[in-house]
Image (spheres, coloured by chain):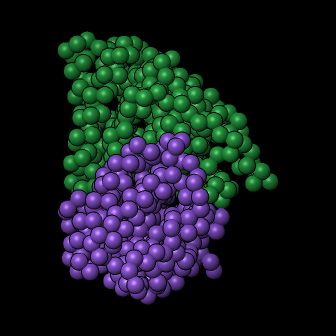
Chain colours: A purple, B green
Amino acid sequence: MDTRFWLDTFRLLAGRIGEQMARYAGTKEGALIIGKGAGGDMTLKVDKIAEDIVVDKLETLHTNYGHDFELISEELGRRSYGEDPAGRIVIDPIDGSFNARQGIPYYATALAAAGGGTVGDAVVALVKNLATGDEFHAVRGQGAFLNGKPLQCRKVEVPRAFVFEAAHNKVGIKRIIPLLEMFERARSLGSTALDICYLAAGSIDVFFYPVPSRTIDYVAGKLILEEAGGVMTGMSGENLDLLTLDLERGCPIVAAGSRETIQKMMDIISLSRI
Amino acid sequence: MDTRFWLDTFRLLAGRIGEQMARYAGTKEGALIIGKGAGGDMTLKVDKIAEDIVVDKLETLHTNYGHDFELISEELGRRSYGEDPAGRIVIDPIDGSFNARQGIPYYATALAAAGGGTVGDAVVALVKNLATGDEFHAVRGQGAFLNGKPLQCRKVEVPRAFVFEAAHNKVGIKRIIPLLEMFERARSLGSTALDICYLAAGSIDVFFYPVPSRTIDYVAGKLILEEAGGVMTGMSGENLDLLTLDLERGCPIVAAGSRETIQKMMDIISLSRI
């Protein structure tokens, strides 16, 4: 894939979405429910506006410029542009829709391009914090960047900053209570893509998504994290690279600066079950 | 007190602190521990830089322009400018120091002016989100504002957006687990002042600080919340207005758009104990 071309395209799209969110985030109009997405969540007007911006551009790229790819998106599901295309464009137009709807300033656009159909095929990723304007990106083999500055994940002896995704609390919270009690500072911020990117930037030490996650929720963040030197796996050690890029829920995930930190966390959870 | 004068002063100070944080937040230098604050927490360089900006200005206001007041701040404690002054200036130079140190984009400056020595004496408050630039302010009896636009707290039948402060987790988390399990979306964002302000803006429905809190942590937010029509009390119904403005830890607190919502939440917690 032409990584430079896709990175530029993603940057343009994230900028346009940011402009619209400045207008609609936290408003009654933005919070209107206008359907149900292919991923099962309610589609809010903020989601639809953001997705339309991406889909309109991608259609133009296919129709007018001959780009072929399969589009995978939370709201519309999977759509092929061209016959049996190899490349995938995976988009989460608003990651953290709940925050965007409420006006809690932590939500993002997450965009990834992959040469094939699995998580490990991702080659370009861009995540933009729409509340602050921070832009994270990575190209496989070329490093990860925050606002153009190279990122290096922090390797810590004693992790301090613990962040978890709290969607579907009833199940998830119970699994990580031993960790919640252990860390002096636990945060649940509400955007998986951003959580993983701030881990890549060294702001966060450990991230847990304690219920089955979808690849679209993390594929962009994962490439940025790995290019910054970090690690993400399933909570039972699954190799996420082998998972198909789709809207199915796979496994709970954990991410940190190193395999050792992930192992420490899993040991704490296992011990507490005995 | 001259409310207009203090509001303008606070706005100037928050702007200056924001400029410095853009430089130091999330950096190794900003994270240096340079002492222990009067409030008991470690003083980081980011805290010290922010406090110095405020203290330098306040000293000038006293020495050169004859303003008398008592200053109450997390880092330096209490300091009198003038003999037995009635007015209090209460500052939390960086609310959410942990986030600021780590580079997690949710931290603020919180500033309040009070005509006397209790929480209920507060007459001017300004809270600035240093990551996004959002500025909240209120003058008692004149309403609350976000970036100059009037705020109205949302009254909800079924609260959805639940936010809790997760400092000192070991004790606190246990108290609110029934609520964590009940809400589909719980957030722990890491700045009490901002949490309360976003509640005032209708972004958040319920806020809990489940361990004893200090008045400096919430006095500014409380005035903004009340001027937006919201309510804050102790977790056992304490009237916070009667508490002294100091650095002591008082009671756990809860805030919402209405007394009815607070009562509902407390009922859920009580029921789960039976």
Q: Quadrant of the C terminus of chain B?
A: bottom right
Tell me the quarter of the picture where residue B240 sits: top right
In the shown orientation, is residue A145 left or right of residue A37? left
Give percent across and percent down for residue A5.
23, 71
In the shown orientation, is residue A217 left or right of residue B62? right
Give percent across and percent down for residue A153.
29, 70
**What residue appears at the point 48 percent right and 75 percent down from the top-left corner?**
A78
Q: Quadrant of the N terminus of chain B?
A: top left
Height in image: A40 above or below B220? below
**What residue appears at the point 65 percent right and 64 percent down from the top-left corner?**
A170
Tell me the quarter of the picture where residue B133 sits: top left
**What residue appears at the point 63 percent right and 80 percent down from the top-left corner?**
A274
Q: Observer-nearest residue: A109 or B238? A: A109
Give percent across and percent down for residue A211.
57, 72
Can see residue B35? Answer: no
Height in image: B113 above or below A98? above
- Taking the view exactly as shown, the residue that stands out farthest to the front is A64
Q: Observer-nearest residue: B115 or B26? A: B26
